[in-house]
Amino acid sequence: MRHELGLDLPERRIGLSAHDFVQLLGADEVILSHAAKAGGAPAVASRFLHRLEAVAGDERWKAAKLAGQQYMRFAEELDRPEKVEPIAQPAPKPPRATRPLKLSVTAIEDWLRDPYTIYAKYILKLDALDPVDMPLSAADRGSAIHDAIGEFTREFAAKLPANPALVLRQIGERHFAPLMERPEARALWWPRFQRIAAWFADWEIARRGALAAIDAEIRGEMSIPLDNDRSFMLSARADRVERRDDGSFAILDYKTGQPPTGKQVRMGLSPQLTLEAAILRAGGFAGIPAGSSVGDLVYVRLSGNNPPGEQRTLELKINKRDQPMEPDAAADDARTKLEALIRSFEDENQPYTSLNLSMWANRYGTYDDLARIKEWSAAGGLGIEEW
């Protein structure tokens, strides 16, 4: 088959490699080395080396190995520097004019966790390239589920169809179609979505009884005035905003992974819902007047496992004594802290440091290699800050 396609046969490539090897082996000075371990286990020297040892004889073989020890000593000395000076945590301080003045609520989490990500992505404008022939990931599954649920909610915001589970499955087929060539999507992801559709239909029917209106995939923004005639724009696309019969609003976020806890939200690790509530209270969503009240912040987990879905109302505490915090108060608090964060980075002496929140140290980030985290954090440079 390779011959018919005009490709070289494997045997020819092996022959060429052997020819190159023999040519190089005829040099005046040659270094032959082999790995001491392969895959974590001790490696066995090749038959070629054993045959070379037999042909050379004990005396010449010992002399050759002794000559090689010099290079081994050089390598060992690299691991024994005279003085160890750990590098400092990167702390770039770009000019104020280059610092971003518009971010989404999802980027605020990066800003709090790892300001260096904001520096690399929005100031240096570096975007990671996807690997060639990248396999499907949890993000692909989450996007397909999220898009299907979002389209269903938009199409039937006013009234549910007669068979919501069937209609949701039909919508899901379109969004899963590009993934169905992969066996894991057909065998695992699609059956999970079918279970999600059945659960979501029952949950939707039960929830709609106390709702006056629903907006899905609604965009909003909030302007925060700064000094020197500058302003910062916070944007969001809420998965679902519900107007309840009592006039208050509920903001829902669909999650295919594990939703954050109330403590993580209060600490500022996951401020998405509270910042969306702040945008709503500021009148940033079309058709919703400023000053409206937010009665509920809800995560809807869609896993397709057992159970296929789960509603989790976000419960926030004011302090360690477990005093409850109302959503309106949480939204106002999130806005106040965000304004303080924005103004702190208006100062050109405020650096975009890397990995401020050590709770996220084990979550690999896109720009961790660029920030050289493994090098400077080895000296114990990670800290924890509460938003």
Image (spheres, rainbow, N blue to C red):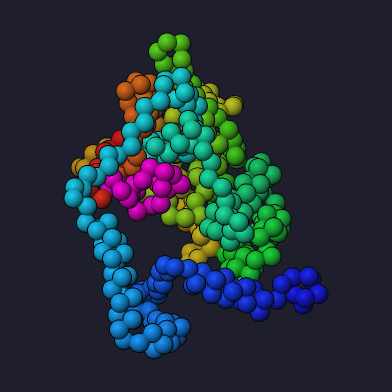
- Residue 140 image point, x, y percent: 58, 55
Q: Is 230 colored magenta in this rendering?
A: no
Q: Main secondary structure of the magenta part?
A: helix
Q: Which residues make up the magenta segment?
A: 358-377
- Residue 224 image point, x, y percent: 44, 20
Q: Quadrant of the N terminus?
A: bottom right
**Picture residue at 52% right of the left edge, 34% below the top:** 125
- Residue 61 image point, x, y percent: 34, 81
Above or below for 307 versus 140: below
The quarter of the picture where residue 131 lies is bottom right
Above or below for 38 versus 262: below
Q: Nearer the viewer, residue 323 or 31?
A: 31
In this view, the residue farthest toward the right is: 4
**Picture residue at 24% right of the left edge, 58% below the top:** 77
Above or below for 233 versus 131: above
- Residue 268 image point, x, y percent: 34, 38
Q: Nearer the viewer, residue 265 or 35?
A: 35
- Using the rendered image of the protein, determine whether residue 163 is visible from the camera's viewpoint: no
In this view, the residue farthest toward the top is: 228
Count of numbered circles on the image: 0
Q: Nearer the viewer, residue 282 or 85?
A: 85
In this view, the residue farthest toward the front is: 28
**Picture residue at 60% right of the left edge, 40% below the top:** 216
The quarter of the picture where residue 17 lies is bottom right
